[in-house]
C-alpha cells in the first residue's frame, strides 16, 4: 500500500513562514505530478500548486510569489515553502500524488495538515 503523510503545519502570525512536507512511502515505482491543495473552513478544496516529475511548476495566482513548491525525488518527498502568510491562507493543506505502481497509475491523497494564520 502507499501512504502520503503531511507535516509542518501549525499556527503562525501574518507575515510569517511555514514549510510543509509530504512524504510518500510504500510500493512505489515512480511518482509523477504532485500537488498541494487547501481547504478553508466552509469552502471547497482548492488547488494551490503543482510540480511534475521533471520539476516544472504551476501555481495559483493567489499564492504566486509567496509559495514555492519543490520535491526531492530521492526521498519521495514534496515540500511547500510558504512565506508572507496571510489570514486567508488558513486551512487544511493536502498533498496529492500520481504514483506508478504494480503496472498502473494511481492517485493518492494525504490526510492533511492544519495551517492557521493569525492577524
Image: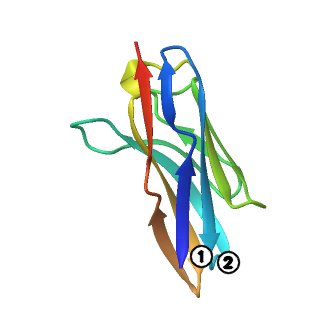
Residue 33 place in picture, x, y as percent: 58, 58
Mark 1 neighbour density, 10 Å: few (under 14) some (14–19) many (20 or more): some
Residue 56 place in picture, x, y as percent: 66, 47
Q: Secondary structure at mark 2?
A: loop
Q: Secondary structure at mark 1?
A: strand
Residue at label 2?
29
Mark 2 neighbour density, 10 Å: few (under 14) some (14–19) many (20 or more): few
Q: CA distance from mark 2 to mark 1?
A: 5 Å
Judge from the rendering whether residue 22 lies leftward or rightward of residue 87; answer left or right: right
Classify 37 as above or below 101.
above
Residue sitting farthest toward the right? 74
Residue 15 place in picture, x, y as percent: 53, 14
Of the numbered discs in the image, which one, if any, rests on residue 33?
A: none
User: Would you identify the image quadrant in which residue 81 lies?
Assistant: top right
**What residue do we see at 69% from left, 61% from top?**
76
**What residue do we see at 54% from left, 62% from top?**
4
Residues under numbered marks 2 and 1 in contact, where contact means CB atoms less than 8 Å apart: yes
Is residue 82 in view from this perspective? no
Classify 69 as above or below 101.
above
Compare marks 2 and 1 and give the one earlier in the sequence: 2
User: What's the image's color scheme?
Assistant: rainbow
Of the numbered discs in the image, which one, if any, rests on residue 100?
A: 1
Amino acid at each position: 500500500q502507499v501512504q502520503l503523510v503531511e507535516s509542518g503545519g501549525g499556527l503562525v502570525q501574518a507575515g510569517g513562514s511555514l514549510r510543509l512536507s509530504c512524504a510518500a512511502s510504500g510500493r512505489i515505482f515512480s511518482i509523477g505530478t504532485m500537488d498541494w491543495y487547501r481547504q478553508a473552513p466552509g469552502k471547497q478544496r482548492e488547488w494551490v500548486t503543482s510540480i511534475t516529475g521533471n520539476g516544472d511548476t504551476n501555481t495559483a495566482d493567489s499564492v504566486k510569489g509567496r509559495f514555492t513548491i519543490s520535491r526531492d525525488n530521492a526521498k519521495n518527498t514534496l515540500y511547500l515553502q510558504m512565506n508572507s502568510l496571510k489570514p486567508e491562507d488558513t486551512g487544511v493543506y493536502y498533498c496529492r500524488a500520481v504514483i506508478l505502481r504494480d503496472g498502473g497509475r494511481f492517485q493518492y491523497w494525504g490526510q492533511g495538515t492544519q495551517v492557521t494564520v493569525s492577524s
